[in-house]
Amino acid sequence: MRRILLLLCFFTSCFALFAQQEGALVNLMIEVRDSASLQPLADVMCRVVNSKGKLLSYKIADEKGHLSLTAHNEDILTFTLIGYGKRKINVHDIRQQAKQPTVILLSPKQVELKEVVVKLSPIREQGDTLVYNVSSFLQKGDRHLEDILKKLPGVKVAENGSVSYQGRAINRFYIEGQDLMGNNYNQATRNMPITAVRNVEVLENHQPVKMLRGRKPSESAALNIRLDKNYKARPFGEIAGGLGIKPTVWDNQLFLTQVMKHSQILVSAKMTNTGKDLSEETREHIEVNNLDAYEPLPQGVLSEDISQEALPQERYLQNKSYSAGLNNIVTLSKDATLRSNVLLYEDHAGYHQSTANYYGGLTPTTLETTEGTKLRTLRIVPTLKYEENGTERFISNELKYSFEQQIIENEVVTNGIGITERSRIIPSFIKNYLSSSFKLGKTMLQINSLLRYANRREELTTTADSLLLYNSTENLATHSMMTRNVLTTSIPMFGNDLDLSLQAYYKNNSYNYQEDIWHRTFKLQGEPGYTWKYYKQSYVTFGLPFEWTKVSLSTKDKRLSARDFVTFKPYFNLQQVLTSNLSLNISSSISANDNALDFYALKPLREGYRDLQITGNDIYKSTHMHASFHLRYRNIATMLFANLSFAYSDTKREAYSHYEYNDSMTIMTWVKGKNHRYNTAVNAMVDKTFIPIGLSLKLDATYNRSSYLVSQSGIMVNNYSHHASGTLTTSFQKLSWLRLSAAFTANYFWERSQIMRLSVLSSYTTNIALYVFPTKKMELKMKFYNLTNEITDGHYHTCGLLDGDFNYKINNVWELGLSGTNLLNSKSYTITQNMGINIFNTSLPLRGREIILRLQLRL
């Protein structure tokens, strides 16, 4: 906490210096009128410039001639409107009356109009909405919506496709104001032709529920995609097919959508064996702004993940992958919609890798392994959602079902022993989430209810050629039923809302491994909370929830253990608008919970051919403290966006995991004892676009420091893990025939403890793309992807990958393309990772050189 206070003092000092340098800010309310008729004038442009003539910001008067802005005493205001003379006024000359706008008079003036070319501003502000004009950011070579989203100042697209604005994940993705995709918007962002999009709107501080607007503030933004008028009320999309030989590769896709006034439909389908990951288009992003609708699924015992490296999986994975999505929304009335989504994903994948793992401790162990993995996945997810979102009533009900099956087969040779391992995992669930809000006079009532049943079956079979210890067959099952019900009433008090809520939570998990164990949790929580809104988007929210928790573990015949406890979970959140361009958010919270394990069994669980877990039957408690600081800056006049965030978390658990490594087995045991973990994270982002010279720059810098307990092979020590990274992304296109984009990333990792100080290891990634446009119909793209990883101190392994793309536009409908990947035919990728007192070295063979001929049809 001392560190947090020091950092807050530092930032406060910075703000004070900033304020001293910039001078006093003045909040102005202005009304513009015609000097002759005294009638209000709409659409008057008011520019704020400093004493040196530099544009700082601007505002446009509404239909009543009103506008509000902030400026410094030494600034100058310039008012312009076609048909009227320009007028300049010094801010220090304006006499602002309390609650009364200052009247500015403009005199009519006849203007002889010359032939002009009207260009829309790249970004314009309409209330709490920023409108990005897509044509201002569009460059040759851009094909889909995601290409543009990555360029928009303040917007960031992660590797998995999730979109954030100024450091916070968006809470809605709309197409023409309709929530067609829910949280599965990757289908739209990665496939919608950019030619169909006119504007991208960022709805700042967006509250999706109309009833709650003005009463329940939101810190997150939403995206709304506005289509070009030529693409409305008709089907549009793309159909593409690609084929290559020696080796035989194929890559096909279909995207069709139609946006009508009262309905929308979107269909996407892909099939490929080029190694691309299609699963992300069927996975929904977690809605972090509505955690009442979220409950983690049972994790079970067996792992579902394949190798996840910094290297994109299409570089090493051999696969046959298929994905499809059918999405439809229908307007039932002015405020009511019915949405249906069906997602399908199937994949047959495989890869090889070699690993050398060093496990520290009093008896260090080294394992050298070669592994061939095959993975088969099938996933089906249908969803049906009804929503009535009016100013007097809100009702939303979502019903979702998910079925998945994974079969993983490994052929392993470890320290000279051959092993075959096969696991089969079948997770499924059905859930219903109801959310509603009603008005009872001036009082508002909210009801949220989540009900879910999940089932997870697991099978494991292992056989070895020379060691009977590795021969086993295991069957496991997890059945989970849970419900969370929240009743909240909002009572107006002192001009704001006092919230009183009651939450009831119940979960019953059944674990079957040779004997059934039931894990039951019941929670009852009451919460008084208050939101004080004191200036536009400035507010303070605080609350003091208190919670009673009762947890038990039992078998059919007896109770193994039980525990109940009462906890207080206070929270605080401050959102402060410092200037028209600068805002600050500070939040903190304390919570407590039962530290439930993923699975309980009375006998050791086999997690793999050499891995055993001993769970025990105790119930543990954990406490968690979190504090964060978030500073956001945006200036649409100068096209500069920036944010700085600091987060600190402190978690105390009553149990820790202890590992014993030897040449034949790894045994993990849950042990009762103090387990203290804390994490510090700092993130900074600067995003600047220079439209006149065709240049954009984005800089991301992060630092993470984690402290956690390591208990392993006779050693117990606190380990400190550090990770620092920086990414610079730039794009340049001022010449019509040339475009250049590049991204440079540097990562540094180091581990520290009382018994080991591992060397700082670094990795560097370079992405350079060169586009050449010899004619209007031809496009040549060369992309160089380089990864350099430090394997040991001062020794590096470099993997360089060169791709090429040639496209020829036959006409406005047909396009022919030729694509080549790994043209240099690089063979392998190697990386070393440090984790605590362990070192892992991995080497992956890469897919070879591949050429695909592609034909595309645009509708």
Image (spheres, rainbow, N blue to C red):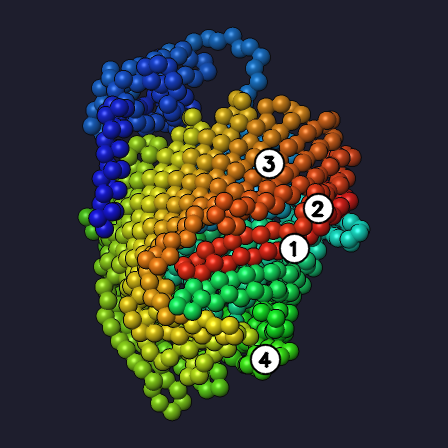
User: Which residue is at a point 42% across and 78% down the rendered structure image?
Assistant: 614
Q: Going from the N terminus, do you reach mark 4 or mark 1 first?
A: 4
Is label 4 in a helix, a strand or a loop?
loop
What's the distance in space between the residues labelled 3 and 2, CA to CA? 18 Å
Q: Going from the N terminus, do you reach mark 4 or mark 3 first?
A: 4
Find disc 1 in the rendering and name its residue.
845
Q: Which percent across, then down, holds residue 256?
A: 67, 49
What's the distance in space between the residues labelled 4 and 1, CA to CA? 29 Å
Q: Is residue 93 left or right of residue 641?
A: left
Placement of 354 over or under 517, stated as above or below = above
Foreground residue among 32 and 88: 88
User: Which residue is at a point 23% across and 43% down the rendered structure image?
Assistant: 6
Find disc 3 in the rendering and name its residue.
768
Pointer 4 and pointer 1: residues touching (CB < 8 Å)? no
Q: Which percent across, then down, holds residue 116?
A: 56, 15
User: Which residue is at a point 25% across and 42% down the rendered structure image?
Assistant: 8
Foreground residue among 61 and 165: 165
Please state which amino acid type lies under the numbered disc 3: Ile
What's the distance in space between the residues labelled 1 and 2, CA to CA? 11 Å
Pointer 3 and pointer 1: residues touching (CB < 8 Å)? no
Placement of 485 over or under 473, stated as above or below = above
Find disc 2 in the rendering and name its residue.
825
Find disc 4 in the rendering and name its residue.
467
What's the distance in space between the residues labelled 2 and 4, CA to CA? 39 Å
**Can the viewer see residue 628 in this picture?**
yes
